[in-house]
Amino acid sequence: MSQVASLLFGLRARVPRRSYLIWGFGLAVVKFLVDTGIVYAFTKKTWSPMAYLLPSIILRNENLGSVPELMHVFLAAAAMPFLWIGVTMSVRRAADAGVSPWIGVGFLVPFFNYLTIALLCILPTKEAARWNPSAIRGGGAYRASGDEEPAPPSVVDLPSGVRAALTGLAACISIGMGMLGLSVYGLGAYGVALFFATPFTMGAVSSFIYNAQYPRPVWHTLGLALLGTVLTGSIVLLFAIEGVLCLAMAFPIAAVLSIVGALLAWAITSATRNNSPRNPVAMLLMLPALAAGEAKLAEPTLRHVTTAIEIDAPPERVWPNVIGFSDLPAPPKWIYRLGIAYPMRATIQGTGVGAVRHCEFSTGPFVEPITVWDEPHRLAFDVTSQPPSMTEWSPYQSVKAPHLEGYMVSKGGEFRLVPLPGGRTRLEGTTNYTLAIYPEIYWVTYGEVLLHGIHTRVLEHIKVLSESR
C-alpha cells in the first residue's frame, strides 16, 4: 500500500511507461465515476464517456440544463488530487524517459496536456539516465551518464530544486484555487483578498518552500512564482471557470503581486535562515478572514460615464433616432469578437414617462422604463433588467462565470441633446452603474473603457441616421 501511495503521491518513486499507462487509464476511469456521481447528485443526469473527453462538455454540457454553481465547486475540489497525481507522475515519467522533467508540467496546460500525455506514453524508459548527485544539493542540471552506478530502478532521484519547485507550485496553485472557490462561490465576492492578497501570498509561499532547504537564485524564485500564477490561470481556463479575456485582465496585477510576494519572501528567507522562523502560515490564515470581512463590508460606488458627439442636425431630427434606432452594423473591433456585449438595435413601446425602451445587445435586451421625456432635449431611463456583460471567449462552448451577472450593474442612463449654433446638436450619452469587483480603482479602468466604446458605437450610429435625412 505504501508503494502505491509513493507512486501516486510522492516525488521519488520511478514511473515506468507501463505504470504510467495503467494508472493513468485507471485513474481516468475513477475520476469519470466520481465526477459523474457529483453531476448525478445535482442534476439526476449523467455524462457519456465520450462527452467526458472535453472539459467544456464536462463542466457546461448543455444537456444538463441549469445547474447550481456549487456543483462546479465540488467538481473542482474533486479534481485537485487527480491534478497532483497527474502532474507529479508526468514529471517522474519524463525523468524516467531521460528527458527534462519540466515537460511533465505540460500536464496542467489546456490542450497541450493531451500532447504531453501522449508523448510520455510513447517514450521508453532510459535506464542510463540519472540525475547528477551534486544537483541534489544545489538544484543543478540533469545529465545522462553510463559511467556511474545507475540509480535504483524503483527510484528517480529528482534534484532537490525540482522537488522544492514542484511542492512550491502545488502550494501556489492550491492557494489560488482555494481562494477562488471561497471568494467567488462561497462568499460571492470578487475583491482585494482575491486579486491582491491571494497572488501576493501565492508568490510568497512558493518562494518560501522553494528556498526553505537551500538558498536558490532569485531569478529562479521569481520565475517559479510567475509560473505558478500562469498555471493557476491555466487550470481555471481548463475547467471553464473563467474565459480568456477576464484572465487576461486579471493577469497583470496578479503577476506583479506574485513576483513582489516572492521577492519579499526570498529576502526574508535569505536574511533569517539561521536565526528565526520564516514560515508564512500567518498569511494563509489571514486570507479567508480578509475575504469574509470584505464580502460583508464592501459596498459598490454609483458611478457615471458620459460620452459626447456632435451631430450636423438639429435636436428635432436627432430625437427620433435616440428613442429607437435601426440595426447597427457588425462590430469591427476585435474586442467585441472576444465576447464583450455590444448594442445591436433599440425599440420603444409607448411615448412619454412610463414608456419602455428595449436596447438589444448581443447577449440580450436591456429593459429601460422611461423616467424623463423632455422632447427633444432629454431622455432618461432606469434599467430593470439586463443581460450578461459579455460572453466569455474560451476554447469551450460556454463559460458562465458568476461575475457576468450582478457585478457590473447598469442602474440607468440618459441622453441629452444640446442645441449648437448652425442647427447642430451635441448628443451626450450617460450610463449610471455600480461595479462590485474590487479594487475598483483597477477594474473601473476596464469598465469605463468598455462603456465609452459602447456609447461611441451607439452615438455614431445615431449621428449617421440623423445626418442622412
Image (cartoon, helix red, strand yellow):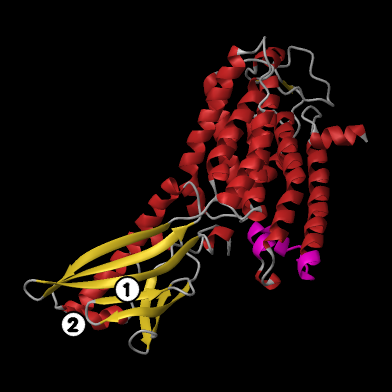
Q: Name the residue under label 1.
A: 329
Q: Residue 317 carries which label?
A: 2
Residue interval drawn in magenta:
40-60
Left or right, 134 with respect to 460, comes to right
Return the residue nearer the eye: 393 or 193: 193
Tell me if mark 2 has few (under 14), some (14-19) or many (20+) residues whose alpha carbon lies within 10 angstroms of its own.
some
Picture quarter with the C terminus: bottom left
From the image, give the main secondary structure of the stretch colored magenta: helix
At a point 53% along the width and 24% down the height, the residue shown is 263
Q: Where is residue 245 in the image (x, y as percent from the top left)?
A: 48, 53
**Residue 50: in magenta span:** yes
Q: Is residue 202 visible?
A: yes
Q: Distance between the residues labelled 2 and 1?
A: 21 Å
Neighbor class of circle 1 (other Cα within 10 Å; few <14, some 14-19, many 20+) is few
Residue at 60% across / 41% down in the picture? 231
> In the depicted view, which residue is nearer to us: 148 or 413?
413
